[in-house]
Image (cartoon, rainbow, N blue to C red):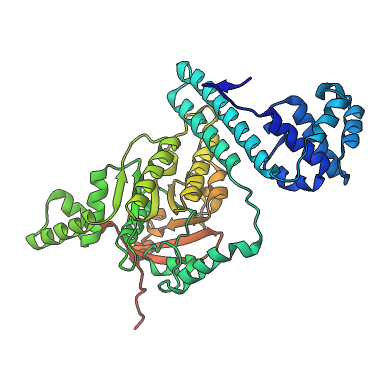
Amino acid sequence: MIREAGVQLFDEEAEQVVLGSLMQSPALFNDVAQLLRPEDFYYESHRLIYQTIAAEIDRGQEPNPMLIINALKSQNLLERVGNRSAILHMASQGVLVGVPSLAQKIRELSLRRNLLSSFRELEKKTCDTAYSLESVLNDTEAALTHLADRYSNYNVVHIRDVNEDFMKFIQHVRQSHDGITGTASGFRRLDDLTGGFKPGQMIVIAARPGVGKTTLALNIALNVCMNKHKPMAVVYFSLEMTRLELLLRLVSARAFLDSQKVQKGRISEKEMGRLVAAAKELYDSEFYIDDSAELTSWEFKQRARRLWRTLQQQGKELGLIVVDYLQLMTDRERAQEGRQNEVAAISRAIKLIAKDLRVPILALSQMNRAIEQRGRDPRPQLSDLRESGAIEQDADMVIFIHREYVVGKDSPENESKKNVAEIIIGKNRSGPRDSFELAFLSEKSLFTDYEPPRSE
């Protein structure tokens, strides 16, 4: 029997009363079934009776004591639950009121037993150094998440019950600026096509190295935290660049200065003033950086949750999370299962934390080298995403950056495209797929809306 500190984590009488009530009044079953599974009953005999009642109701019958006795007898289970007299006695204990409350009590006791069992198993693993600490922490999170989901209430609702959320959404949309109902990227055409990045979305920016993934992500992050209508907090997880390198790019872009000149100290006093002013603007914003060179999916989830909670307590909103880049993150639990399975687990973790926190996540991704050998059409495709098709599956939106100047450097005709990047929306669950151009000023670490030259 499960007892802890003198507390008994089961209630035999409550289980008998609930079962007796169901045999007397089968109409109670629908409410009880929303709360209780067979495994929630502590006694095996009670689990078997509950399963039999459920089976008879599924067959269109109205369970009564004799029907249950005969059903158990036909399955050779009557001796395992006691005998005929035990069933009749149980039925006599049925009541007409308070049954859902008793069912709730049985459910909570079951969850407490499961929680205690999980803690004991985790205690064994914690004391066994053959298990990595990360493995134990992952198991702890999984166990608590499973039990928390199990404890949550019935989630199927009538559509009218969504009205309050719907009206809040409509009010938000009507108050939006230029039809942007999500987190604005700051790029006119991208925001027109997407309506802004929505809470819970996983947005993938993919390109080959040197094309401008980090620059575009930094520009979007900067635009989010500097939005004149509604500035929001941003956290940038950089697995490749240091926080100083990121700050250099951010300040250079904000001050519209050549980052190479800034890095070498070759700037005038006037430019220095612009640099200081831009840095102050950044310092006054809610821009957070994590430049851990090694970051596991578990660490990412916990750090994102912790910052989200901190900002919530301060009355602030986390508007965007950036991961630069996805393939540099690790998942030690899946590492032994092959790289594709590991990347799939990382991708799924990113999508789930976006959904859990209701924050859009911008995840940068590398692409396969095959794109460079495709010949006539080197423009990226969804199949070019590197190492795992799970990225394409999990992503709500996939944005490719294509620069003809980089792909075809040796072609003189590409010289005119040196400062132009094509942005291709290859996947968009909530809107159209399209492409458009941005101006790319690499020396200033800056993308801007592109205005094509006018013909004379």
Q: Which image quadrant is residue 66 in?
A: top right
Considering only vertical position in the picture, is 288 above or below 91? below
Q: Position of residue 443 (x, y in %)?
A: 25, 57
> Is 196 above or below relative to 333?
below
Instruction: Give residue 177's quadrant in the image.
Output: bottom left
Q: Is 376 displayed left or right of 26 in the figure?
A: left
The residue lying at 71 percent from left, 47 percent from top is 31
- Residue 421 picture quarter: bottom left
Horizontal side, residue 305 vs residue 288: left or right:
right
Residue 26: % across, % down: 81, 45
Vertical placement of 297 versus 185: above or below? above
Pick the quarter of the image with the N terminus.
Answer: top right
Q: Give whichever of 274, 72 is nearer the camera.
A: 72
**Relative side of 81 to 41, left or right:** right
**Front residue of 227 and 113:** 113
**Res 123 seen here:** yes
Seen in the image, is 199 located left or right of residue 61? Answer: left
- One can see residue 441 in this view: no
The single residue placed furthest to the left in the displayed view is 269
Residue at 70 percent across and 30 percent down: it is: 13
x, y percentage for residue 345?
A: 52, 38
Tell me what residue is drawn at x 89 percent, y 31 percent: 69
Q: Quadrant of the C terminus?
A: bottom left
